[in-house]
Image (tube, rainbow, N blue to C red):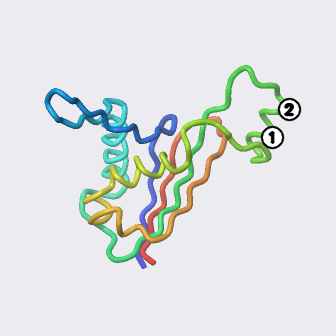
Amino acid sequence: MSQVEFSIPGEPCAKGRPRFIRATGQVMTPEKTSRYEQLVQLSYMQHVGQEVTLHGPVKAHIRAYFSIPKSISQRKREQMISGDLKPLKKPDADNIAKIVLDALNGMAYQDDKEVAALLVEKHWAEKPMVCVTLSEI
């Protein structure tokens, strides 16, 4: 069974909704979404390489780590780091998964339709990042 692990530095980002331009009929992807998808691809290539590595059904485990607000009390900070307090903030877990999985199309797998199992977790951390583990089922 093949497995791939890598991390994406920085605050987790959500997949933005496409914008439709009525006059031209074009669909525009938001700039922030495009930049984050490029960061996901770059992180994948740095850790794994460029080839498609997984075949068949894939399990994806995505762990999003959000930075702890500076204005928080020491007691709450400790609860956040220990995992007793979870981030109940945007972006939504499903939108984090969407941007990561879409960005990996044609790189980690042929298409994200191959993702048959998905677990997304949100945590607090001193260093914001998204950690991704992909494995063949």
What's the amino acid at mark 2?
Answer: Arg
Q: What element carries label 1?
A: helix
Circle 1 residues within 10 Å: few <14, some 14–19, many ≥20: some
Q: What element carries label 2?
A: helix
What's the residue at 45%, 78% (across, down)?
137
Could you tell whether 7 is left or right of 42 in the image? right
Q: Name the residue under label 1.
A: 79
Residue 110 vs residue 73, the one in the foreground: 110
Residue 20 vs residue 121, the one in the foreground: 20
Residue 37 vs residue 127, the one in the foreground: 37
Residue, far left: 24
Q: Mark 2 points at which residue?
A: 75
Could you tell whether 87 is left or right of 15 in the image? right
Q: Position of residue 101 (x, y in %)?
A: 39, 55
Mark 1–mark 2 contact, CB under 8 Å?
A: yes
What's the amino acid at mark 1?
Answer: Gln
Q: Where is residue 40 in the image (x, y as percent from the top left)?
A: 37, 45
Residue, far front: 22
Q: Position of residue 123 (x, y in %)?
A: 65, 45
